Amino acid sequence: MSMTVLEFLSAVALALIAGGGLGVAVVNGINERKMHKLKREDDKEDKAALETEKRVKAVEEKVDALIDANKYILYDRIRYLGQKYISSGVIDIDDRRILNGMHTSYHDGLGGNGDLDKLMEAVNDLPLKTR
């Protein structure tokens, strides 16, 4: 923060009244007090920013863990259902649509690695179950 005009004029007047050395000492004292106050405020802001940064990092780590968990759950579910449909030799249109949606979420949304692509090709090649 900068010194207000009134504070500056008061400091100048005091310096003139008190004489050279004493006046300068008073003005320097006022400036040092203001600088100390500014430093304390900056330290508080730095501490708050550091705490916020720590909380954001912790949340990011939890989100990453949830993404990994969802990848494993989807991987397992797609693999299980795909093998079930392949062994039965047919698939219902709705089941195929849902399984493809799960695979898209796993592969594109969560960054799956493509291990299920061959399985999904086999599932999509299955004849559709008639009602």
Image: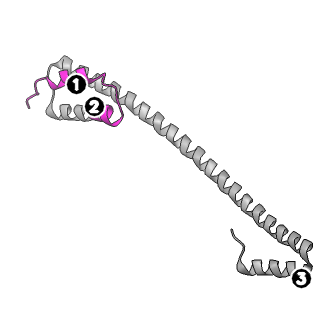
Residue wearing tag 2: 103
Neighbours of disc 1 within 10 Å: few (<14), some (14-19), many (20+): many
Tell me residue 34's x, y (percent).
76, 66
Kind of element beneath mark 2:
helix
> Gap between marks 3 and 1, in whole Å?
91 Å
- Which residue corresponds to mark 3? 17
* 12 lies left or right of 117: right
Residue 6: give x, y in percent of width and height.
74, 81
Q: Quadrant of residue 86?
A: top left
Residue 13 occupies which quadrant of the picture? bottom right
Q: Which residue is mark 1?
A: 120
Q: Are marks 2 and 1 in contact (CB under 8 Å)?
A: yes
N-terminal-most mark, 3 or 2: 3
Question: What residue appears at the point 67 percent right and 51 percent down from the top-left corner?
Answer: 47
* Residue appearing at x 11%, y 27% in the figure: 129
Q: Residue 55's x, y, as percent?
A: 58, 46
Q: Give how far apart the Cα atoms at labels 2 and 1 are.
A: 8 Å
Q: Is residue 127 magenta?
A: yes
Q: What is the span of residues highlighted in magenta in the rendered image?
A: 102-131
x then y, percent, for residue 63: 47, 39
